[in-house]
Amino acid sequence: MSIRRSSSLTILLILAFATITACQSNKKESGDSGSQQGFEKIDKTTFEKMMDQPNTVVLDVRTDMEFKKGHVPNAVHINYYASNFNDEVAKLDTSKTYLVYCHSGSRSFNACKIMTSKLNFPHVYDFAGGWKAWSSGK
């Protein structure tokens, strides 16, 4: 193999490695699982096991209308879209564990990010299936 061909192959390998490393870094930064954000996503089974534990609060972040149509028993309601959402959440006891849900997972994920990164709540879980999974009975 010539030196020129060997150098080209080395450069290609370096570029491939750099691309893979960058993609992995971007995936971690996106926080898709939530765990890199200081919270983790949980499924319905885990949600049901955790919701009756001492010092655990179920937090519904859906709109007022959604909440009135139905909600998880004993859920605390704070509308994610309300202008005072951060202020209302900041009033909550940070020593408790929070199981956060919305309709299907988007608002609860964002609410969990706010709770952990801006408001320093240490025990936050995102019920990824949300009301949709809870009310489906599955």
Image: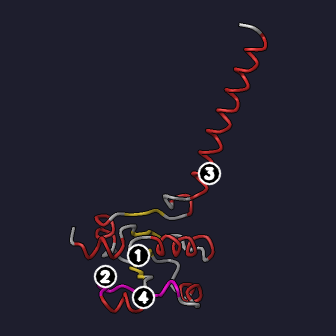
Residue 86 badge: none
Distance in Å between CA atoms under marks 2 and 4: 10 Å
Q: Is residue 18 left or right of residue 73?
A: right
Crowd class of label 1 (few under 14; some 14 to 19; many from 20; radius 10 Å): many
Query: Going 33% across and 76% down the picture, which residue do you hit?
Result: 131
Magenta: predominant secondary structure element?
loop
Residue labelled with disc 3: 26
Tag 1 or tag 2, which sits nearer the N-term?
A: 2
Q: Are marks 2 and 4 in contact (CB under 8 Å)?
A: no
Element on which disc 2 rests: loop
Element on which disc 3 rests: helix
Q: Amino acid at mark 3?
A: Asn
Tag 3 or tag 4, which sits nearer the N-term?
A: 3
Query: Going 50% across and 83% down the picture, which residue do you hit?
Result: 80
Name, please, the residue furthest toward the left: 137
The picture places residue 5, in percent across and down from the top left corner, at 73, 14
Residue 72 badge: 2
The picture places residue 33, in percent across and down from the top left corner, at 48, 58
Residue labelled with disc 1: 101
Tag 1 or tag 3, which sits nearer the N-term?
A: 3
Crowd class of label 2 (few under 14; some 14 to 19; many from 20; radius 10 Å): some
Q: Amino acid at mark 1?
A: Tyr
Query: Residue 56 versus residue 67: which sits nearer the camera?
Result: 67
Distance in Å between CA atoms under marks 4 and 1: 10 Å
